Amino acid sequence: MIKIIIHITKFIIATVTALLFASCNFNVNSIEGSGNVTKEKRIVQGDFQKISVSNAIDLVIIQSDATEIVVEADDNVQKEISTKVENGTLIIKCKRGSFRDVTKKVTVKMPNIDKLEASSAANVMSQGLLQGEHIDIETSSAATLDINIEYDNVSADSGSGSTIILKGKALTVKTSASSGSSINANKLLANEVDADVSSGASTNVHAIVRLKAEASSGGSINYDVAPKTIEKTSNSGGSISQG
C-alpha cells in the first residue's frame, strides 16, 4: 500500500508541475506558431561556461572550439526567445506570453560546459560527448535533461517532477533528487557515488568503488552493481536496493 501511495504521489507531482510550469505551451490567449520555421544566429555580449534554459524550450548542446548560438523557431516567435549572458551564464527563456504548436529550439556550441540548469518544462540534450573537469546539473519544474558526459566530478540535483538522464564516465558523482523527480545514472560509470533522495523521488546509479546512499520520505535508490564498499541509510519509507 505504501508503494502504491508513493507512485501515485510521484505521478501527481509530475503532472501538476508540468501543467503549472510549461507556461510557454498553454493558455487560452496563446500565440500560435506560423508554421514558417526560421533559423537565426544570435550574438551575445560576454563569455559563458554555464547555461540556464526554461519555458519549454528545446536545447541542444555541442562541445566545440568555436562558440555559436542558433535559434530555430516560427518566425512570429523568434523575437520572443531571449538569449543573453549574465555573470558567465547564458540565459535562454521566453520573454513573455504563451505559445502553442510552435518550434522553440536552441543549439549552442561552446568549448567548456561547467553548469547546466533546466526548468519550466525545458528539454536539454547533448549532441556528442561533453567533457571536462567538473559539471553542475540542476533540473526543476518538469524539465528533462539527457546528456552523454565524461567528467572528473559530477553534481546532479533534480526536483519538482523533473528528470535527469546521464550516460558516460566520471570519477565522483553526487546526486540529490526530491519532490517526485528522478535521476537515471545507471549508465554513468563512476568510481564513487553519493546519492540522496527524498519526497517520492528516485535515483539509479552505477558505483564501482564506493556508494553512500541516503533515502527518506518515500524516496528510492537503486544500484545495478555492488561496489566494493557501501553505506546505506534509509528512513520514513525510503528504500535502497540492488537490482
Image: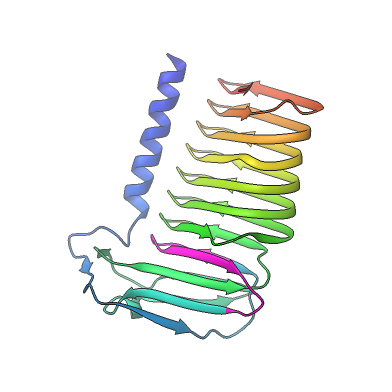
Image quarter of residue 175: top right
Residue 21 position, x and y percent, is 37, 53
Residue 82 lies, in percent from the top left, at 43, 76
Name the spot of residue 130 as percent of width and height, x first.
Answer: 65, 61
State the residue in front, 21 or 188. 188
Q: Position of residue 58 (x, y in %)?
A: 42, 62
The residues colored magenta run: 51-67
Picture residue at 61% right of the left edge, 47% below the top: 167
> Is 53 contained in the magenta span?
yes
133 vs 23, left or right, is: right
Q: Is residue 63 left or right of residue 159?
A: right
Identify the residue at image location x=60%, y=47%.
166
Give above or below for 77 relative to 21. below
Against 39, residue 56 (above or below) is above
Quarter containing the C terminus: top right
Of residues 144 and 158, the one drawn nearer to the viewer in this rendering: 144
**Quarter of the N terminus within the rendering:** top left
**Residue at x 58% of width, y 35% of height:** 203
